[in-house]
Amino acid sequence: MSDIMAIALEYAQKGLYLFPCKKDKTPFTVHGVKDATNDLDKINAWWKEFPNASIGLATGEKSGVWCVDIDLPDGPKSWAEIIKQYGSCPETLEQITGGGGKQLFFKYNGTVIKNNVGKLGVGIDVRGENGYSILPPSPHPSGGTYRWENKIKPIHAPEWLLELLKSSEPIPTMSGAEKTDRYAQKALANEIMAVSMSGSGTRNDTLNKAAYSLGQLIAGGCLNEGHAMAGLIGAATAVGLTAKEARATIASGFRSGASSPRTAPIDEDIEYTINEQNEQNEQTTILVSNLSTDEHGISKNEHEMSTSVSGKAFNLTGLITEFVENSNGSFTTKDIDHEFGLTTRREKNTRSQILYKLSNKKLIIKDNNISGKYHILKTDLEFVDLDAPAEEQFPLTLPFNIHNHIIIPPHSIVILAGSSNAGKSAFILNTLWMNRMRQYDKLYLMSEMGNGEYITRIKKFCTNWKEEWKAIKAASKSCDFNGAIEHHNKNGLTFVDYLEEVEGEYYKIPSIIRAIYDSLGEGVCFVALQKKMDGKIGRGGEGTLEKARLYMALDHFAVGEQSIICSLRMVKIKNFIGKNIQGHEIHFRLSKGHKIDQLTDWMMSSRVDRDAYKTKYEQEVDLATEKTDINDIVMVLADGTPRRITDQTSRQWQKQFHTFDVRNELERIASQSKGKPFLTTNYFFQISGILKKKHDAEIKRLGGL
């Protein structure tokens, strides 16, 4: 019985209706989801016929569950905007798809949930009645597999989500706000905020007033009732009201408001005022006008938006606009708050309104993956000058003379993706050491290494280490690297060691790399990433290749007490010089935590027998310090260097070359090497070749047995 079959039978025993699917998620059965069953005999027969089939789950009333499918790259952002706008979503059964997206499963409660694609937002689908989902551990077309993020029981969906799905119109999230009436959406957002901030003694009254106000807009035809109901239910349940009593109050408010329909005002100022009773000497008033605007499309009245703190007033709109105009790359709301000392809720609400306006005018754009982050959109272009000199090279020296094989111009990203314990930090520190006398600034941002460990490691490079390393600035930093570069080293050489994933969300890493790239002036930044052993690409996938002029992959072959032996592969070279070494690799020994010694020339990675090299290097690791087993056989190279063949390796060769006594042959070779040395530094492969030749001759002599 296959593992997938066994798990499919377990699912069926829990009452889930299943059917077999192909790897591309299309059904094996003639009628697809209509054939789904929880009959164990039928499921057993299906998976005997299709042993590697994926497990298709019929969603809806049959299985008692339905799901929200949140796909990359846009789904997570859309879902976050929905949660932000309509309410929180308690934890429920969740799986991670092989493509990196996620699916949230909810308990069927008698409400018919229809299938839809994109109604909730870009990248979000719903699998309901007559729909289906693929369950773990099924394979995914991307090469990954489905897996459970948790195994808790599915819960009933929050009321606001059910209300959204009942609506016949697309869900207006912040990303889709321009497709809806801006005034109505702003009114909805303000009323949701008012309910969210209400106390236990005022929440029902506040909810009723909010419903009345929005009911007027619903009756006026500029707001969808389902969207308004969902948003208010989410806010009301968040402050302690039950869904039942909230729904009754909202429905009553809607009916009352419908008696006085209204629409968005035309050609007049719209004033939004947020009042807070407990904060004195502070006032925020936002004035938005559709009449007269400046060169950025920002209204003149909006330039009057000001914040008064302890009696000191300043033009916040002007300051933030100037900040955006004079900056490059990206920034976060935290950056703005820190820059202008914004601490109160009023001030931050004002800031949000200003950023929203700048976003609508295409001066900035929200990050697709990171909440509260914006990218600055520069409107000016620097056109190509055909008379300009050829691309210049950033002055840089790299280990193993890599700089002789590639042009790395100013404003470049270099990626160093390494598996655990493969020497990423050592490579970086060596590069810093080689360039310590350069005139540009050097900055080392370390996410794991503390000050003590950093000092311990740089001491190994020389005796007068303080003098030699004083030109290099080092600091502990685990996030917001673009801000550090923007303010401290736009035009120099920076190393990020290393860029960690954000709460396991590896898909965000390419966006962070792009932000680092945008923060550079004429400088170069090396970004270290974690990767799987023997993989070419670091955490974050192929998106991490996008901005890299040079992309390198580090792995280790063997680890000893005093040294490790590693490989360095050239995954991407944007602009090579002379011989193109993209797709090549080199092997080196790293000892004493910093010393790197080249062991091979550049070799095509596709032609390297990594297992053979691994066995060879395991022979050599720390030979001088490790204890020699009495059964080891010592060879002598032509240069007089002793090398040993371990008893374990001799036994491995015996299994491979079983037609003769391998140990006797190794002892003969050892004796010959001492009398008339003939073994080179490539001795391991020489000996393996001698053994294979003898084995092939024995096979031929024995008639091919």
Image (tube, rainbow, N blue to C red):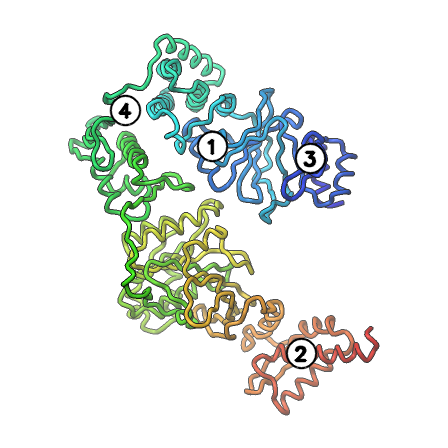
What SS does tag 4 mark? loop
Q: State which tag comes first along the sequence, 1 or 3.
A: 3
Q: Secondary structure at mark 1?
A: loop
Q: CA distance from mark 4 to mark 1?
A: 29 Å
**Where does label 1 land, which residue?**
121
The residue indicated by pointer 4 is: 274
| Mark 4 residue type | Ile
From this viewpoint, is residue 126 visible? yes
Q: Earlier in the sequence, mark 4 or mark 1?
A: 1
User: In the displayed structure, would residue 94 be above or below residue 681?
Assistant: above
Task: Please tell me the numbered disc located at residue 11.
Answer: 3
Secondary structure, mark 3, is helix
Q: Name which of mark 3 and mark 4 comes first in the sequence.
A: 3
- Residue toward you, 611 or 693: 693
- Compared to 389, does 161 lie above or below? above
* Element on which disc 2 rests: helix
Q: Residue at x 43, y 66 (%)?
A: 427
What amino acid does circle 1 point to?
A: Gly
Give the class, few, some or many, for how many residues have Cα within 10 Å of label 1's Cα (few <14, many ≥20): many
